[in-house]
Amino acid sequence: MKIYVFGVRGGDEEAPLKNWMAEHPEVEVGFTHDILTPDNANLAKGYDGVCSVQREPYAREALKMLHDYGISKLSVRNVGVDGFNFKDLNDFGFTLTNVPVYSPNAIAEHASFLVGRLLRRVPEFDAKFRAGNLKWSPTIGTEIAGKTVGVIGTGHIGSVFARIMQFGYGAKVIAYDIDPNPALENLGIYVDSLDELLAQADIISIHTPLAPQDYHMIDADAISKMKQGSYLINCARGGLVDTDALIAGLDSGKIAGAGLDVLDNENGIFQKDFGSFDAIPNEKFKNLASRDNVIITPHTAFYTKRAVHNMVYEAMDTQIKLLNGEITKNIVNTK
């Protein structure tokens, strides 16, 4: 059995991959640090399956090349599959798997940190400190306890975040999901509509995948339904929030602050070193990042040692199962 692995990050993924390889000497593994493209798809020639991860779209030509090499099993080491055109996958007969659960706590904890940093005005204190100003007044913060926290999407990550907010911080949690989580229903937190959540929540945190119908879920209309001075947290997918509407909401004061681990059109921005802030080629990004009431982290909510280990191991274990003809629980429905 032979598996080729694309896009292996040397700083964090290579070590767990090599550990997995040592534990599976019966599997021949080849890998590259480069993502899968038409220019390097030939590296997988002679292999049985492919494991990959990337933030750029998967090119149809690259997928066709894999198909022509007889490869039909593709596992990605992440949960999001919006980089694929499902028509391409179906045209070439691919079975695609992802890693839907690798460490819900990593992302839920990160979202909670963003809430705390915003409400306690940490970016403003950081700026004052760097300027030598150690006075606390008048930069007064707000407590999470007693606030209404709205959770959009209550799967593995959203449910952990809801429990952190309710049982850890003492917030009143409300939630909306088209498919409520049975593990949370006994808490009585669900509201009947997204509009109801938007109208009630002081803090809104998004934890849904980016389905086509949810693109720009938070747009100007949605923001108009929020409470004045509410906070928005997005550690899910950038495309869920309309950046122009968010900027307008921040300008008007409708949104008091935003914590963003993801941004619309972040590909080509995150995971690159531009040398200086001014060199970043995205004016909307710079607009947001220059504000004291906005915190941006470059898609790092998932990025913990445990999560990366689990992503590598789960994807590689899944490849073995697929190549052995097993039907795994994490096959993506591309139909």
Image (cartoon, helix red, strand yellow):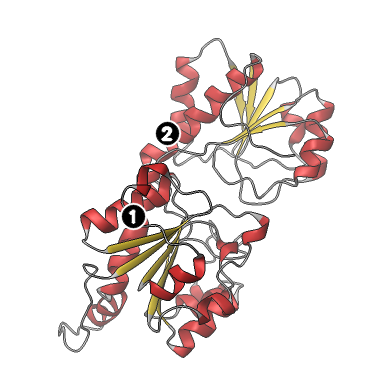
- Image quadrant holding the C terminus, namely top right
Which residue in the structure is indicated by mark 2?
Answer: 309
Residue 269, can we see it? no
Q: In this view, does 105 lie to the left or right of 313?
A: left
**Residue 227: image tag:** none
In 3D space, how far apart are the residues under numbered discs 1 and 2 (Cα atoms)?
Answer: 35 Å
* Mark 2 crowdedness (10 Å alpha carbons): few <14, some 14-19, many ≥20: many
Residue 5, can we see it? yes
Q: Position of residue 151 (x, y in %)?
A: 41, 60
Q: Nearer the viewer, mark 1 or mark 2?
A: 1
- Amino acid, disc 2: His
- Amino acid, disc 1: Gly
Q: Identify the residue at horizontal 63%, vertical 63% (top origin).
A: 215
Q: Identify the residue at horizontal 77%, vertical 38% (top origin).
A: 89
**Residue 188: image tag:** 1
Q: Where is residue 140 in the image (x, y as percent from the top left)?
A: 20, 83
- Image quadrant holding the N terminus, namely top right
What is the number of callouts on the image? 2
Q: In which image quadrant can residue 272 be found?
A: bottom right
Q: In this view, does 236 lie to the left or right of 4?
A: left
Q: Which of 85 and 48 is in front in this view?
A: 85
Q: Identify the residue at horizontal 28%, vertical 76% (top origin).
A: 121
Is residue 12 positioned above or below 152 on the image?
above
Q: Is mark 2 on a helix, strand or loop?
A: helix
Q: In this view, does 319 lie to the left or right of 250?
A: right
Q: Position of residue 238 (x, y in %)?
A: 56, 62
Q: Which of 134 and 245 is in front in this view?
A: 245
Is residue 23 positioned above or below 58 on the image?
above
Q: In which image quadrant can residue 204 be found?
A: bottom left
Q: What element carries label 1?
A: loop
* Mark 1 crowdedness (10 Å alpha carbons): few <14, some 14-19, many ≥20: few
Q: Earlier in the sequence, mark 1 or mark 2?
A: 1
